[in-house]
Image: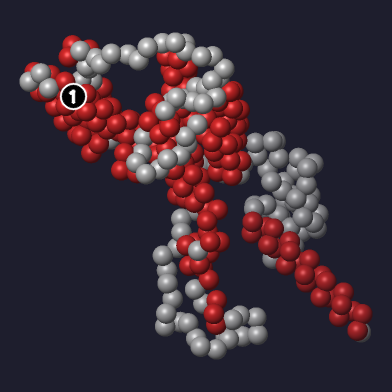
Amino acid sequence: MACDKREAGNLLGLLGLGTSLFTTIIGIVYVCKHPPTFHLKFSECPWTNPDDYTFWVDCNSAWSSDWGMKGMPHYTPLLMGVAGAVMHRPVLLQVMGFPKNFLQYGIWLIVQGFFANFGYCGKLGVINAWFSIFLGLCCFVAQSVGAKTDRMLELTGPSLIDCHASDEKPSAPQAGDEIQDYTALSVMSFFFFPPTGIGAIVSSMNVKKHKKNKDLEAARNSRGHAVTWMQYSFALGVVLIGSAVTLGVTHGRVAADGADGDDGDDGDDGDDGDGDDGDGDGNSTNSTDDSTGDGDEAATARRLLKALKMKVTEDLAVYD
């Protein structure tokens, strides 16, 4: 029973890791679409107010908007996604003692959904947000039955909240033949992210070497290192590949004109916004200054200019 709860906890933890990785992808895509500025003014900044509406202290306000606290909302998905992914296997950040149970992790996933997914990247953010919230509620159920991931057990040991007592004895240490080296997975992880994939391959080779020398303790440690490197290789690879694919598919795409049967003119009557004379000015009377009949932005500008001229003529007539 304890083994089943541990496996269920690990599965739930992996699903939560997936939402954090997808949140990281959303953060990367959002930042790429809203790149921060690196332009910093110095010689252009005065010591007095340039005018009555501008203060001299706001000379580099664009920088503070991107890199100060005002720019923090732009990086929320990226920061929370990376933090959620690191929780699964901190490696260098072993001091991170969070989350210690599924109650904490469930709260984190719900906060992640509300503040780092909703409002970012359209449907991608909405889908991932609802999935994060659903997993957060599942974490509350897992906490009530005493489930924990391997990482949580490393931090705190067995859960104090356990509705089903287990009389299962601790498992005996694995024999040499049962210690897997994960060579195939290590090689596969290399293609996802080569820098950490190399570490996984080296650790897998060390497992074989230690097993050959009958040093089972060293073999177990090397296996743990191989698993850690593989997890980071797959995670980083998924983030980079997912971000590149999303940016590549959506880059420069614009909705087709006239998708709803209207060509974007000034009315919903199905015409082209011109009058009956086809000159693009919206009037049925021919004019000498616009006869192209293109009905595009230039025609719209001409119609506005004509309306302005008519307004000025009416105003002058009043004074006459």
Horizontal and vertical percent position of residue 126: 60, 35
Residue displayed at 52% across by 34% down: 105
- What colour scheme governs how the chains and residues are painted in the rendered image of this protein? secondary structure
Up/down of 295 relative to 46, above or below: above
Residue displayed at 83% across by 71% down: 311
**Quarter of the image that includes the C terminus:** bottom right
Residue displayed at 37% across by 44% down: 95
The reply, left or right, for residue 135 in relation to residue 304 is: left
Along the viewing direction, whichever of 144 and 128 lies nearer the viewer: 144
Horizontal and vertical percent position of residue 137: 61, 28
According to the picture, the residue beneath numbered tag 1 turns out to be 217
Horizontal and vertical percent position of residue 180: 22, 17
The reply, left or right, for residue 88 in relation to residue 113 is: left
Horizontal and vertical percent position of residue 158: 45, 24
Location of residue 97 by image quarter: top left
Residue displayed at 81% across by 75% down: 312
Q: Is residue 167 visible?
A: yes
Q: Residue furthest left?
A: 213
Secondary structure of the residue carrying numbered label 1: helix
Q: Residues within 10 Å of mark 1 (few under 14, many from 20)?
A: some
Location of residue 39 by image quarter: bottom left
Q: Is residue 194 visible?
A: no
Callout 1, which amino acid?
Glu
The reply, left or right, for residue 43 in relation to residue 304 is: left
